[in-house]
Image: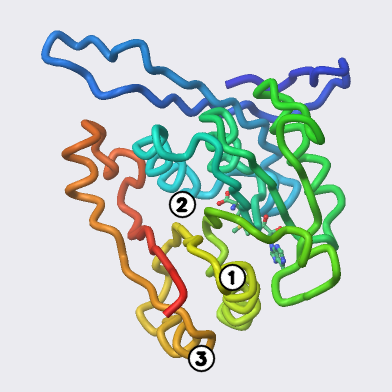
Amino acid sequence: MSNAYAMSDGRPVSGQLKKFVFRGKSSSNGDTRGEYLEIIIPELLSAGYSFYTWPSAPLLAWYLWTQRRHIRGLRVLELGCGTGLPGILAAKCGARVTLTDSVALPRSLRHLSACCEANGLVPGRDVQILGLAWGLFLTDVHNLRPVDLLLASDCFYEPTQFEEVLSTVAYLLDGTDARFLCAYQERSADWSVEALLKKWGLKGAVLDLDSLSESSGVDYRVLIGERTLHLLEIVPE
Ligand SMILES: C[S@@+](CC[C@H](N)C(=O)[O-])C[C@H]1O[C@@H](n2cnc3c(N)ncnc32)[C@H](O)[C@@H]1O
């Protein structure tokens, strides 16, 4: 979209701006009932995998948009945010959002702040941004509980890390009514989280995106193209 922009404090940043548009369901005359949300994500394509938006993120954001009437006021925590599109959308829809990415990647966390600012969200006031490494249970992880909704997009891309992700999820969901919504890309038919879900006392169900497409009036296939993406809901067993 552009190759230069400025943050709210005037700092110049170079890269590209990606625009994601969410609309209410069209009526027969094409009227979208005034429901419209535009999210701008600054991307730095060459900087590393947390500096651009992976294909799973628009899918999860679209799902949250279909649920926007139910997420206002919820305590939402996103893991492995990268550019944070789903969490930013949840915050714009009135949820109380904490965005996290690896504590070992301070530059990624700064970029996440920039993504929030690009959408008029002030870190520390409108959203919280924290370093959270999967599978590491430092005292500040305890302070993140309780949550109502846990999110992640494209955090199951490295099988050696699946258990770290799920152990964090199990800890945050334990003893609550919260659920974990996770969009992921199918990269190998051999990869599975079934055994790990059992080990960590969790169960998962893949959501039916076709019927959601029908009821929301937006075809999710337009968002994902030729890729095989799924939306998985995980809750305690
Ligand atoms: C494939 S990217 C997905 C980013 C974003 N959720 C999206 O869909 O656009 C994976 C993200 O997980 C983060 N990550 C990788 N290892 C992590 C760890 N051990 N703990 C927390 N986050 C981690 C990366 O920094 C990166 O932002």
**Type of amino acid under label 1:** Val
Query: Measured along the vertical axis of the image, is residue 156 above or below residue 26?
Result: below
Judge the density around disc 3: few (<14), some (14-19), many (≥20) Cα neighbours within 10 Å.
Answer: some
**Type of amino acid under label 3:** Lys
The reply to whether discs 2 and 1 touch (Cβ–Cβ < 8 Å) is no
The residue located at (75%, 42%) in the rendering is 128
Residue at mark 2: C-beta within 8 A of ligand 1: yes
**Type of amino acid under label 2:** Ser
Local SS, label 3: helix
Q: Nearer the viewer, residue 10 or 151?
A: 151
Mark in the foreground, 2 or 1: 1
Image coordinates of residue 219 in percent, x first then y, are 24, 38
Query: Measured along the vertical axis of the image, is residue 234 above or below residue 182?
Result: below
The residue located at (64%, 74%) in the rendering is 171
Residue identifier under label 1: 169
Judge the density around disc 1: few (<14), some (14-19), many (≥20) Cα neighbours within 10 Å.
Answer: many
Label ID, residue 103: none
Circle nearer the N terminus (2, 3): 2
How much space separates mark 2 and mark 1, taking CA atoms?
18 Å
Query: Measured along the vertical axis of the image, is residue 50 above or below residue 161?
Result: above
Residue identifier under label 3: 199
How much space separates mark 2 and mark 3, taking CA atoms?
26 Å
Q: Nearer the viewer, residue 155 or 100?
A: 100
Local SS, label 1: helix
Residue identifier under label 2: 56
How much space separates mark 1 and mark 3, taking CA atoms?
12 Å
